[in-house]
Image (tube, grey):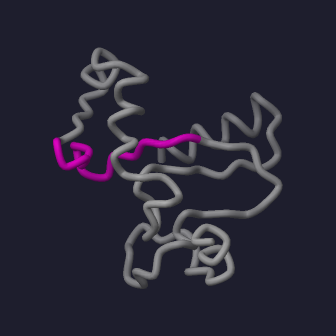
Amino acid sequence: AARLAVENDLKTQCRVAKVISLAPGSGETEQLWSITALGDLFALVGGDFTARLGVELTPEYLMLPAKTVCGIFVESEHDFQSCMLCRKENCTGRRAAFDQSAWNVVNH
């Protein structure tokens, strides 16, 4: 819900027509954005901020509490979901089907 609210704010307040979200570790490929980049994002926003939010990053790069998300929004003319790069069919958070052509672009 929070991710969707931020996306809607970007569209209305910043007059951005379309945004895509990118998160470290999304999809099945480390080439897109490695999960270890979460450490860099947490360092960028600072420990005080994440502590106030009640969010913790484990040494294995898992965020606590569960279902916490971290990433960036990018203005784009294209429809893209990181789910398009993941072959895990039974994911409860899936927002788009696997896309072989998107996979080929990232892995070449």
Horizontal placement of 74 versus 51: left or right? right
**Which region is colored magenta?**
59-72
Horizontal placement of 48 versus 70: left or right? left
Q: Residue at x 57, y 80 (%)?
A: 97
What secondary structure is the stretch in magenta mostly built from? loop
Q: Residue at x 18, y 42 (%)?
A: 58
Q: From the viewer's perspective, is residue 87 above or below residue 72? A: below
Q: From the viewer's perspective, is residue 101 above or below residue 36? A: below
Q: Position of residue 103 (x, y in %)?
A: 59, 75
Residue 63 in magenta stretch? yes
Res 38 quadrant in image: top left
Q: Position of residue 75 (x, y in %)?
A: 74, 44
Horizontal placement of 9 versus 90: left or right? right
Residue 93 in magenta stretch? no
Q: Residue at x 77, y 29 (%)?
A: 14
Q: Position of residue 49 (x, y in %)?
A: 34, 19
Horizontal placement of 45 versus 22: left or right? left
Q: Position of residue 36 (x, y in %)?
A: 34, 46
Res 40 quadrant in image: top left
Q: From the viewer's perspective, is residue 12 above or below residue 31? A: above
Q: Classify the position of the C terminus by image quarter.
A: bottom right
